[in-house]
Image (cartoon, helix red, strand yellow):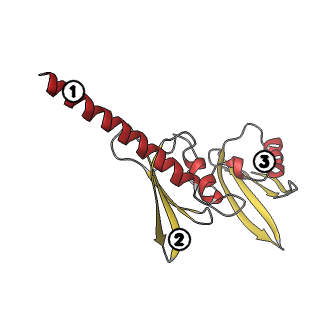
Amino acid sequence: MKHYVITLLAAAGLLVVGCNQSVETASQKFNELPPAVQKTVRAQAPNAEIVDVSKTSSNGMDAYQVEFRSEHGANPKVLVAANGTLLNSDMAQPAGAIQKMLTPTGAVGTPFSSLPEAAQKTIQAQAPHAQIAGISRHADNGRVIYEVEFNDEGKNPTIKVADDGTLVQSLQK
């Protein structure tokens, strides 16, 4: 009986050590990713535990698949291009969250906070309590413009703000 208990404890100890090495390995792999990829991954799941990182290819370009631990069964994954563009995400979005937003670099899936600080300040000054429904990014005469659409039942007002914070179009209902 003693031999059985000792064997069981040794096996449990090896399992715990193996789990810690797996987390450490995933963490090390994450730290080796390009900074743009790390930023996009953390924007998708800022507090999630990473369990695996692998390099792959998507449409002929390098991409990275990052898998997160989940208490609810299947582990969610994100697929991010080497330039930081979100290609695919299994991450659950909170109720009322914007499903996809554009960042200053054109990457999809990162939050409002990824916009330039000057543009954020202008948007907040124009509509401090409005809920954002969507943000689109486009160029106009060599200038980056963000069109912000707000939730307002039946109206969906918009404003246009340049990346330097200049108000291009005031609130239109």
The mark closer to the camera, 3 or 2, is 2
Q: Which of marks 1 and 3 precedes in the sequence?
A: 1
Q: Which of marks 2 and 3 precedes in the sequence?
A: 2
Q: What residue is drawn where x is 78% and y is 62%?
A: 145
Where residue 14 appears, as percent x and y from the top left, is 31, 37
Where residue 16 appears, as percent x and y from the top left, is 35, 35
Give amino acid for label 1: Ile
Q: Residue furthest top?
A: 2
Q: Residue furthest right?
A: 166
Give amino acid for label 3: Gln
Q: Which residue is mark 3?
A: 120
Q: Residue furthest left?
A: 1
Residue 1: quadrant of the picture: top left
Q: Secondary structure at mark 1?
A: helix
Whether residue 92 is visible, yes or no, is: no
Give amino acid for label 2: Asp
Nearest the eye: 139 or 54: 54
Q: 29 above or below 48? A: below
Q: Is residue 74 left or right of residue 80?
A: left
Q: Which of marks 1 and 2 precedes in the sequence?
A: 1
Q: Residues within 10 Å of mark 1 (few under 14, many from 20)?
A: few
Q: What residue is drawn where x is 51% and y is 45%?
A: 93
Q: Residues within 10 Å of mark 3 (few under 14, many from 20)?
A: some
Q: Which residue is mark 1?
A: 6
